[in-house]
Image (cartoon, grey):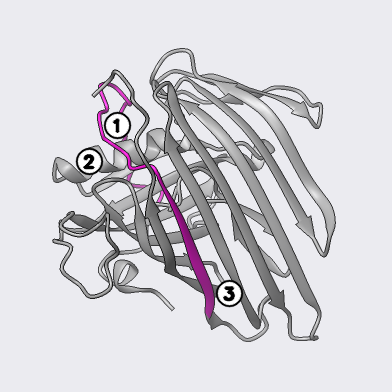
Amino acid sequence: MLRGLRFVAALGGIFAVLPALAPSAAAAVLPSVSPMAKVSYRPAAVAAHLASYRASYALTLTRADPGGAVVAGDGRISIEFADVCQGYTLTQRLRTRTADDSGAVVESDLTSSSFESRDGKRLQFAIRNQVNGIVVESYNGVARIPKPGGAGRAVFTQPKRAPLVLPAGTVFPTMQLRLLLQAAAAGRNFVSVPVFDGPGEGGLSQTGSFIGKRQPARYAGVPAGLKGLAWWPVRMAYFAANGHGMRPDYEVGFRLFANGVSTRLVLDFPSFSFDGRLTHFRLLPRFPCRHG
């Protein structure tokens, strides 16, 4: 999955900084997600080996509704994820170019880097979003959840602002991914947790994820490093953290492999959709960690 960051709104496109995104096969087999049916899993004793890797995805606009904010667009997502023993590092870059029905073009360049502790208690993040060469958003800070399943707090060093309270049950992005893999391996088909990934109050969302049936990696084009691994189709919805509204802000579809890597991304917004095709993938060497 595009691990780590969620989508950030910028007119001309609503873009992802993320874990893992016309519906693909992953979206087609799963129903739309409703916030009313919530099943939560506490991040206790969550164990899943996540691969360290670099990957790139080419984005193609597959749906643009008449009168919507986007009528044309493309882009690219680049990810580097690493298990560094004490935790996980994630660097992401999302570059998009979109146009509206007046012909106005918006070029967005969104970069982020983060470190999440292995126990899921600490997230350090740095995020910057440029639109047409101008920095429009920049966030740096640290979030902590002292007790798994408990409440937490995010402190921002840039821009300076009051700390953000994280409600009980909040998890950070890599912990969310590990919970998804834990649920998938156990045959559960739904996970709902609040997730915080960094960009201010907009970085806190309620998520609901449907997990489809386990599938073998037997389709053409699977890259080395994923061959022979099982995968699950996942459909994930992001809702406003305040709980208002029955419809999600956006949904993400993907094929989630047992080592945490995602392919066949779908970024589904109310008036447009992007597909993300894996164009480059390489496993990185494992750090010589003492844990398993």
Q: Secondary structure at mark 3?
A: loop
In the image, farthest residue toward the right: 134
Confirm or deny contact between disc 3 and disc 2 (CB under 8 A): no
| Label 1 crowd bin: few (<14), some (14–19), many (20+), radius 10 Å | some
Q: CA distance from mark 3 to mark 1?
A: 32 Å
Which circle marks residue 155 in the picture? none
Q: CA distance from mark 3 to mark 2?
A: 31 Å
Expressed as whole percent of the image width and height from the top left, the position of residue 175 reads 39, 33
Instruction: Identify which amino acid the numbered label 3 is placed on.
Output: Ser
At a point 66% along the width and 68% down the height, the residue shown is 96
- Nearest the eye: 2 or 221: 221
Instruction: Identify which amino acid the numbered label 1 is placed on.
Output: Tyr
194, above or below 165, in the image: below
129 left or right of 145 in image: right
Image quadrant for the C terminus? top left
Q: Which residue is mark 2?
A: 183
Confirm or deny contact between disc 1 and disc 2 (CB under 8 A): yes
Residue segment shown in magenta: 35-61
| Magenta-drawn stretch contains 60 | yes
| Tag in front: 3 or 2 | 2
Instruction: Identify which amino acid the numbered label 2 is placed on.
Output: Ala
Q: Which residue is mark 3?
A: 271
Instruction: Please tell me which of labels 3 and 2 falls first in the chain.
Output: 2
Q: Which residue is mark 1?
A: 41
How would you classify the magenta stretch by its main secondary structure?
loop
Q: Is residue 39 visible?
A: no
| Label 2 crowd bin: few (<14), some (14–19), many (20+), radius 10 Å | some
